[in-house]
Image (cartoon, rainbow, N blue to C red):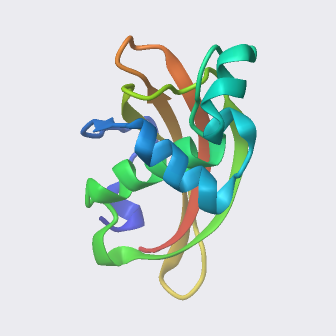
């Protein structure tokens, strides 16, 4: 979709993604090698009572789910910023995540482009919000 096809307040819902312990440990091993993501014994003694997903992993899944909706298609040019990132609740192995995406701002720019900002809110299978953040992209008008 082009910038002019979006409306402020428009809402999209993604499909779901079920996270496994193996997914969590593989991602963390490469990008966030902290004990709460990798060391089951130590994580079981910590405040979350077990392995949890990295917040960055949760953000990446949220983004993946949104992009896989195909709404931007070939009209998106590039991401420009992320703001108001919040990791609200831990994500555990077995959690199934889905994201609600709301258009919160759009501004025309020069050269037939504009900036579209959406708010991503990701929920687990108990409908508890686990993540939220705003994403802006440069997109064709």
Residue placed furthest toward the bottom: 111
On the question of residue 104 being in view, the answer is no
> Image quarter for residue 68?
bottom left
Q: How many marks?
A: 0
In the image, is residue 45 above or below residue 19? above
Residue 113 or residue 43, whichever sits in front: 43
Whether residue 120 is situated above or below residue 57 in the rendered picture = above
> Residue 69: image x %, image y %?
26, 53
Which x, y percent locates residue 35? 73, 38
Identify the residue at image location x=34%, y=64%. Answer: 72
Specify the farthest residue to the front.
Answer: 41
Which quadrant of the figure contains the C terminus?
Answer: bottom left
Q: Quadrant of residue 114?
A: bottom right
x%, y% of residue 34? 74, 44
The residue depicted at 36 percent of the width and 58 percent of the height is 67
Give the residue drawn at x 40%, y 35%.
Answer: 99
- Of 8 and 87, the residue lying toward us: 87
Q: Residue at coordinates 54% horizontally, 88% vertically from top-left?
A: 111
Look at the image and tell me in which quarter the N terminus lies.
bottom left
Q: Determine whether, in the image, residue 37 is placed left or right of residue 83.
A: left
Q: Quadrant of residue 54?
A: top right
Q: Where is residue 36 shown, x and y percent of the image?
A: 69, 33
Please indicate whether residue 103 sits to the left or right of residue 34 in the image: left
Describe residue 92's horizontal placement relative to residue 13 as left or right.
Answer: right
| Above/below status of 17 relative to 139 | above
């Amino acid at each position: 979709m082009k910038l002019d096809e979006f409306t402020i307040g428009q809402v999209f819902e993604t499909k779901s993604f079920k996270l496994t312990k193996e997914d969590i440990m593989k991602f963390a091993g490469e990008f966030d090698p902290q004990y709460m993501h990798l060391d089951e014994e130590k994580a079981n003694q910590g405040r979350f009572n077990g392995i949890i997903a990295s917040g960055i992993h949760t953000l990446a899944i949220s983004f993946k789910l949104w992009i896989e909706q195909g709404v931007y298609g070939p009209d998106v040019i590039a991401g420009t910023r992320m703001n108001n990132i919040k990791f609200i609740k831990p994500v555990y192995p077995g959690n199934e995540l889905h994201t609600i995406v709301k258009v919160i701002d759009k501004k025309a720019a020069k050269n037939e482009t504009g900036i579209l900002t959406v708010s991503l809110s990701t929920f687990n299978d108990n409908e508890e919000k686990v993540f939220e953040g705003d994403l802006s992209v440069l997109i064709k008008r």
